[in-house]
């Protein structure tokens, strides 16, 4: 299996894979110190774009979930 992105319930995006690169808006790579990579989804991390666990402290509640058979289209 290649790279997998898991949306954690009320938590970060967890990126699992052997060859993961996270780039900023200018195309510069971040230094990754932990695998799997966890990207902030709550917006409150002090280590953005990486998760620092703040979602638990602030009670982040995610609204999205995959819905089988849904007609939603990914953003382009």
Image (spheres, rainbow, N blue to C red):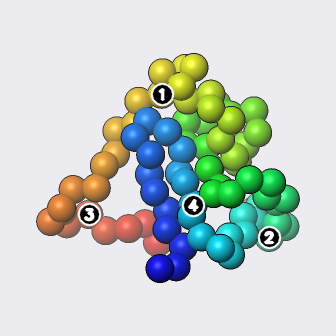
Mark nearer the viewer, 2 or 1: 1
N-terminal-most mark, 2 or 3: 2
Q: Residue at x 19, y 66 (%)?
A: 71
Q: Position of residue 36 (x, y in %)?
A: 63, 57
Residue bearing mark 2: 27
Q: Position of residue 42 (x, y in %)?
A: 55, 36
Residue bearing mark 3: 72
Residue bearing mark 1: 60
**Label 4 vs label 2: CA separation?**
19 Å
Secondary structure beneath disc 2?
Answer: loop
Secondary structure beneath disc 1?
Answer: loop
N-terminal-most mark, 1 or 4: 4
**Label 2 vs label 1: CA separation?**
29 Å
N-terminal-most mark, 4 or 3: 4
N-terminal-most mark, 4 or 2: 4
Mark nearer the viewer, 1 or 4: 4
- In the rendered structure, the answer to whether residue 15 lies left or right of residue 47 reads left
| Front residue of this view, candidates 36 and 67 | 36
Secondary structure beneath disc 4?
Answer: strand
């Amino acid at each position: 299996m290649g790279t997998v992105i898991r949306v954690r319930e009320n938590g970060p995006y967890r990126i699992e894979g052997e060859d993961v690169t996270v780039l900023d808006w200018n195309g510069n790579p971040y230094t990754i110190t932990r695998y799997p990579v966890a990207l902030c989804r709550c917006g409150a991390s002090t280590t953005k774009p990486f998760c620092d666990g703040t979602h638990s402290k602030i009670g982040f509640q995610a609204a999205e979930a995959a819905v089988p058979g849904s007609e939603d289209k990914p953003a382009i």
